[in-house]
Structure formats: C-alpha cells, structure tokens
Amino acid sequence: MTTADPKSARDHARAQAGTRVDAMPILPALADDVPVGARVVWEETLAPGGYGAKRLSRGTRLRLIDSQGDACLSMLVFNAEMSTERLNIADTLKVQWNGYITAGKLILSDMGRVMLSVLTDTAATHDAFCGASNQASNARKYGDGFNHGQHPNARDRFMLGVAKFGLSRKDVHPCLNWFKGVRIEDDGTTVPQVGPFPAGREVILRAEMDLIVVFANTPHVLDPRQTYSVTPVRLTAWTGEVTSEDDTIRIATPEGLRAFLNTEDYYAR
C-alpha cells in the first residue's frame, strides 16, 4: 500500500485501525484483571524508554506491574488542581522515620498531605534517594542520552509528560523510582538493587488526592550495566472509594494520621 498521495495515505492510515502493539495506551481503557464492578480509567504499557502521564481522581487505585522483571519506573506526582503542591521525597521519608517505601507507607506532598498510599507491594526494591537520570549521565554510560535518541533519560521523558498539563522544566522535581532499589549501608555506601528480578512484581497505590502522575521507564541512574537495560511496565487505574476512618494505613502512626487529616481538611469544602 502506497502513501504517495493523500487518498492512498488516508487508506493506509485507516487500515491501521485495531492494530495492537506491545506498548501502547488502550482506548477506551479496559482490563480483565481488576476488581469486579470497577471502572477502568487507565490501561497502558510503557515501552523501554517510554513515558506516561494521567490525571487521577481521589480514591483511584493505580497498579504498576513490572511485567518482565527489569523495569525502572520513575514517578512525579502533583496536586491536580494546584500543581505547585507536589511530591516531597524528603518529607515522605523523614515523617515516616524510614528510608524505604513499601506496603503501608505514604507518599507525601510538600504541604504535609498524603498524596498516595501504598496498598500492596510484592517487589520491595524501590528507591527514594537517587532521583532520575539525565542527558549527561546517559551520555557518559551509553554514548548518548537525547530525548529522541536510542537511550532517552528519565528527566527529559518527564519534560514531555509534564508538558501535557501545561508544566515545564522547573516543575520536574525529585522523583521516586519503583522496582529498582538501593540500600544504604552502615558506612553510608549506596548499593543499587537492579536485578533483573522475577517478572510480574506489582505495586498498588491509592490516590488520596486528585492527582497528576507522570512516569518515565528508563534505566536506574546507578544501574552498573553498560547496556540500556529496561523492560516494559504495565499501568492500570480504576475508580475506588476514598479513605475510610478505620483504614489501617490511615491510623497506623500518629504522623501518618496527621497527614491524612491535613488531606481531609483540604477537601472539607
């Protein structure tokens, strides 16, 4: 089939209808492995080097699946109605007296509010210390790191994601990395945990605010491998209820409860 003239180009484009590839958004969003009765609002697989961004309503569940065991999913989070409020890594760690994010932990904003709760985590190798790769770090390791080259970096992928919501370079803040972790030794040494790991590890998050989430699926900045090693990651989101007063995550610690109360006060209108 030729595309040499407008009619042929139109016919060629229309012939692609229904084509599916391994990494793409599914529209309308559909998934057959969510709770019965749930309404799916996002279903997408990010390719190696890919990115994604979505606005999620309060109460939405967001599942991240490391489908082949070698993903590194870097995440930014913003308050959807006031983007100057965003994920604060330092507060997320110090308020919870813990450097490692896993099930039962909270993702906090710079306003002291809970943005996300971690409901499920079968990976337990995540990183809140090292941040995102950039063009220079990728160029040193892989020979190039340009956004549209063979080895795109997380920071520039973030730039494309935030731009979909009218945001820019200044809004790309320190990120959280899912599925690739680090451990901090007693002497302060940062030891990367990059796998590859068993396929199918997953994290389920609950949105405690109306949020914008932005993801980049690129190799961890401390990955020692000289090849650009990263595999697809699946994202699924479905509607759900907001936190209840007897929720175990909400009442697990005094600090966490205070953060939930700050969030609930924000929505008490």
Image (cartoon, rainbow, N blue to C red):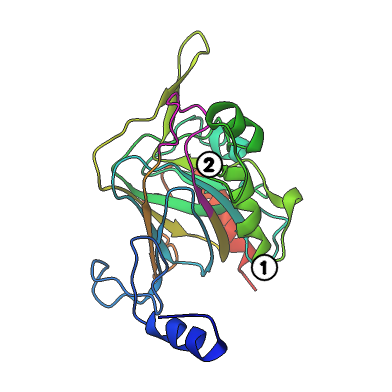
- In the image, what residue type sits under mark 2? His
Q: Position of residue 120 (x, y in %)?
A: 32, 49
Total tally of numbered discs in the picture: 2
18 left or right, relative to 6: left
Q: Is residue 47 left or right of residue 196?
A: right
Image quarter for residue 2? bottom left
Residue 77 vs 15, above or below: the answer is above
Q: What's under tag 1, amino acid-wise?
A: Glu
Identify which residue is drawn at 72% across, 60% down: 167
Residue 53, x across and y down, in percent: 54, 61
Rendering quarter of residue 60: bottom left
Q: Which residue in the protein does label 2 denote?
A: 151
Q: Name the residue nearer the viewer: 162 or 246.
A: 162
Q: Using the image as rendered, state which of residue 205 and residue 197 is in the foreground.
A: 197
Inspect the magenta stretch and tell me whether residue 258 lies in it: no
Our reading of the magenta stretch's main secondary structure is loop
Please provide the residue range marked out in magenta. Answer: 215-229
Q: Which residue is mark 1?
A: 81
- Labels 2 & 1 near each other (Cβ < 8 A): no
Of label 2 and label 1, which has the lower sequence position? 1
Q: Nearer the viewer, residue 171 or 141?
A: 141
Q: In the rendered image, is residue 250 in sight?
A: no
Q: Quadrant of the N terminus?
A: bottom left
Label 1 environment density (alpha carbons within 10 Å; few <14, some 14–19, many ≥20): few
Q: Is residue 251 left or right of residue 33?
A: right
Q: What is the secondary structure assignment of the residue under circle 1?
A: loop
Residue drawn at (30%, 41%), measured in percent from left and top? 69
Question: How far apart are the alpha carbons under marks 2 and 1?
Answer: 33 Å
Tell me the tag on residue 133: none
Q: Residues within 10 Å of mark 2 (few under 14, many from 20)?
A: many
Q: Quadrant of the C terminus?
A: bottom right
Q: Residue furthest right?
A: 170
